[in-house]
């Protein structure tokens, strides 16, 4: 197992998914704010420019009207008055005679231009009063009917001031946003990392062999908590499977050695002592029987392990348990009769369960066989299925010798055999398989003492 | 019969091939899935016996590929697993039967026989061997014109035997086809049913039709 080289917390935060996400959103936000800024900037500028042009035009045409009535001298007089009594902000004027002589005004002479004009006054002319700073002016020029030229102008400072204010506001806002985004991303990233670290640490502990370790959840039921819950469930499942595997291997070690040893002994014996073909045949038959028994035990163990692993659950289908049990009853009827037993079958109609048909068939068959095998001739074995409020109730009962209550739990263990059954055939795995199948299907199984006899009851 | 055997375990393969040849079959062998597929698609076989787990290409993929190439030869899967899912997967891939290892050779022989002579999807409504007749629609059985009453499971056993008249049918085959039991019950349920069936169809009719083949199974055969 190779582990990544150690990295500083900062690097890890910068690399964390949540931080990158925050950064992405911050960038996205900045881009949209930028678009908004551009729109505001251009719209405001355009509106202000229009407004200024309108003021200048009105002023120019008003003065042109005065010129029409009072001629050049009247206009000059009016301009002088207006220059002295400004009412609407700083307005600059220029009135040039047709020969380009400046008649009146606080702007230097210039070639006549009609309409809106932006210009910077020549530096050699005295600065227009008020702020004294030379700024860009915006003017409206008008050539009067007698050839004289009139220019009305206004300082553009208002416009540039507003533009600067917009830029400033935007710069502050975006700087603050970026700062908040980075701080938030770092915070989110580090808390995210802390939780991921917990998961990493736990999984490392598990890899190192502590299968019982579980990841602590925060209890907020958010996505990470759900992930943790799932991981924990998965770990529990793995542990269960591992335990099963361990159980099987120890069972194999424990209970397969004996028959294997016996097999070896028989073969050795045949090799040393057998003299005739008949001797060899007998020894071979015995060895084959022993091997068959071993194979059977082995496949029963595997089957139990398979069932306990629960893989079959994915192949569950709706099963008519009534029909299945009836068919099993019919299957065992002749053997029961031949063995001197009475097999009673009492089945309620229409009992459905979700499950694996093969396994359920094997479960019920095993129980029926147990009943028939472990009771003396003349006994009655009953197979019944009842529909109850809590679900189906399967019962296989007999009126034989029964099992002492102290041993009721142990009979479901692998290889457990009652003392009196040791001499009869059987692997001691039948009931272990029955229990595994019942558990797989969500049933609970228990033994009940009958007087006389024994009942195996399987219910939900 | 010409049989394809795909099995990677040398001992098992030699054992099966030798046995089949002794019974007069021609056997082609492959020890991996790729060679198996090459033979399966190139030659004409009566039955293919394919191990589920062979190298290069597993048995399931082999059969899927062969079926995709329009090879309709019946397939018998050999498996060490025998779980329910396992069996279903085999049928889904296009297998026709399966046998869990280890198996008795007689079992393999009987199954190969049953596969090779698979009756066409029967539209017949009556089955007959000798003077024994079975009406599948009326669900009645007569021998020499005399009506015989059978229980449902006895009827199913006899139907299966009649459909495979002249072939050996093993105990496991009956468990699977009649009861759908894919496990080995420790009780002699097949033997007891057969004995009851025998007493109904053979007792009092002179020459028997239902025979026990020692170490293998049962066969229904018309008297010569």
Image: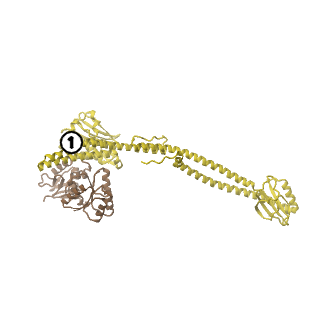
Chain colours: A yellow, B brown
Quadrant of residue A100 in the image? Answer: bottom right
The image shows residue A61 at horizontal and vertical percentages of 80, 61
| Residue at 54% over, 50% down | A21
Front-most of residues A17 and A74: A17
The image shows residue A454 at horizontal and vertical percentages of 25, 36
Front-most of residues A382 and A409: A409
- Counting labels gives 1
**Residue B83 shows in the view:** yes
- Say which chain tag 1 marks: A
Q: Quadrant of the C terminus of chain A?
A: top left
Front-most of residues B153 and A33: A33
Residue that lies at the very extreme toward the front in this rendered image: A5
The image shows residue A306 at horizontal and vertical percentages of 32, 46
**Residue B158 shows in the view:** no
Residue behind mark 1: A425
The image shows residue A214 at horizontal and vertical percentages of 42, 41
Q: Is residue A132 above or below residue A243?
A: below
Quadrant of residue B20 in the image? Answer: bottom left
Q: Is residue A112 above or below residue A159?
A: below
Q: Is residue B69 left or right of residue B201?
A: right
């Amino acid at each position: 197992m190779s582990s990544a080289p150690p990295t500083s917390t900062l690097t890890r935060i910068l690399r964390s998914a949540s931080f990158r996400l925050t950064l992405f959103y911050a960038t996205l936000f900045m881009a949209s704010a930028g678009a908004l800024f551009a729109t505001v900037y251009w719209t405001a500028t355009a509106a202000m420019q229009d407004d200024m042009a309108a003021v200048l035009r009105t002023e120019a045409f008003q003065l042109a009207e005065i010129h029409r009535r009072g001629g050049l001298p009247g206009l000059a007089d009016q301009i002088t008055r207006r220059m002295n009594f400004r009412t609407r902000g700083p307005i600059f004027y220029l009135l040039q005679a047709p020969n380009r002589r400046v008649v009146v005004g606080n702007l230097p002479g210039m070639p006549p231009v009609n309409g809106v004009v932006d210009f910077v006054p020549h530096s050699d002319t005295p600065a227009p009063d008020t702020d004294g700073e030379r700024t860009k002016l915006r003017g409206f020029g008008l050539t009067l009917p007698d050839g004289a030229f009139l220019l009305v102008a206004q300082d553009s400072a208002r416009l540039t001031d507003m533009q600067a204010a917009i830029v400033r506001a935007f710069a502050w806002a975006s700087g603050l946003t970026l700062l908040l985004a980075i701080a938030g991303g770092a915070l989110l990233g580090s808390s995210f990392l802390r939780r991921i670290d917990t998961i990493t640490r736990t999984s490392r502990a598990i890899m190192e062999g502590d299968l019982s370790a579980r990841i602590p959840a925060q209890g907020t039921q958010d996505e990470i908590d759900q992930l943790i819950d799932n991981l924990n469930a998965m770990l529990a499942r793995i542990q269960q499977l591992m335990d099963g595997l361990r159980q099987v291997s120890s069972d194999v070690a424990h209970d397969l050695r004996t028959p294997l040893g016996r097999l070896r002994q028989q073969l050795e014996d045949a090799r040393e002592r057998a003299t005739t073909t008949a001797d060899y045949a007998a020894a071979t038959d015995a060895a084959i029987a022993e091997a068959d028994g071993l194979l059977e035990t082995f496949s029963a163990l595997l089957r139990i392990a398979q069932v306990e692993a629960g893989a079959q659950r994915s192949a569950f289908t709706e099963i008519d348990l009534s029909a299945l049990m009836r068919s099993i009853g019919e299957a065992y009827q002749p053997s029961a009769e031949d063995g001197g037993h009475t097999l009673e079958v009492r089945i309620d109609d229409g009992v459905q369960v979700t499950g694996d048909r093969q396994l359920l068939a094997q479960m019920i068959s095993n129980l029926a066989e147990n009943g028939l095998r472990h009771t003396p001739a003349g006994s009655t074995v009953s197979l019944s299925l009842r529909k109850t409020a809590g679900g189906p109730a399967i019962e296989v009962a007999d009126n034989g010798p029964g099992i002492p209550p102290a041993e009721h739990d142990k009979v479901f263990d692998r290889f457990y055999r009652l003392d009196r059954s040791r001499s009869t055939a059987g692997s001691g795995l039948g009931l272990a398989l029955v229990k595994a199948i019942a558990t797989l299907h969500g049933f609970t199984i228990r033994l009940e003492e009958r007087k006389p006899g024994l009942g195996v009851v399987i219910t939900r | 019969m010409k049989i394809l055997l795909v099995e990677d375990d040398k001992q098992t393969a030699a054992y099966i091939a030798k046995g089949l040849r002794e019974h007069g079959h021609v056997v082609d062998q492959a020890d991996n899935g790729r060679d198996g597929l090459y033979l399966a698609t190139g030659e004409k076989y009566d039955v293919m016996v394919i191990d589920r787990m062979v190298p290069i290409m597993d048995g399931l993929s082999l059969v899927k590929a062969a079926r995709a190439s329009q090879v309709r030869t019946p397939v018998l899967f050999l498996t060490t697993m025998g779980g329910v899912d396992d069996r279903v997967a085999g049928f889904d891939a296009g297998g026709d039967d399966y046998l869990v290892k280890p198996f008795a050779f007689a079992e393999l022989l009987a199954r190969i026989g049953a596969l090779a002579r698979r009756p066409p999807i029967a539209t017949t409504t009556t089955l007959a061997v000798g003077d024994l007749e079975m009406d599948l629609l009326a669900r009645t059985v007569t021998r020499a014109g005399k009506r015989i009453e059978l229980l449902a499971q006895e009827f199913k056993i006899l139907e299966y035997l009649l459909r495979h008249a002249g072939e050996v049918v093993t105990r496991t085959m009956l468990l699977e086809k009649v009861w759908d039991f894919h496990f080995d019950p420790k009780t002699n349920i097949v033997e007891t049913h057969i004995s009851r069936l025998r007493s109904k169809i053979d007792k009092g009719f002179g020459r028997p039709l239902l025979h026990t083949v020692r170490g293998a199974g049962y066969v229904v055969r018309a008297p010569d």
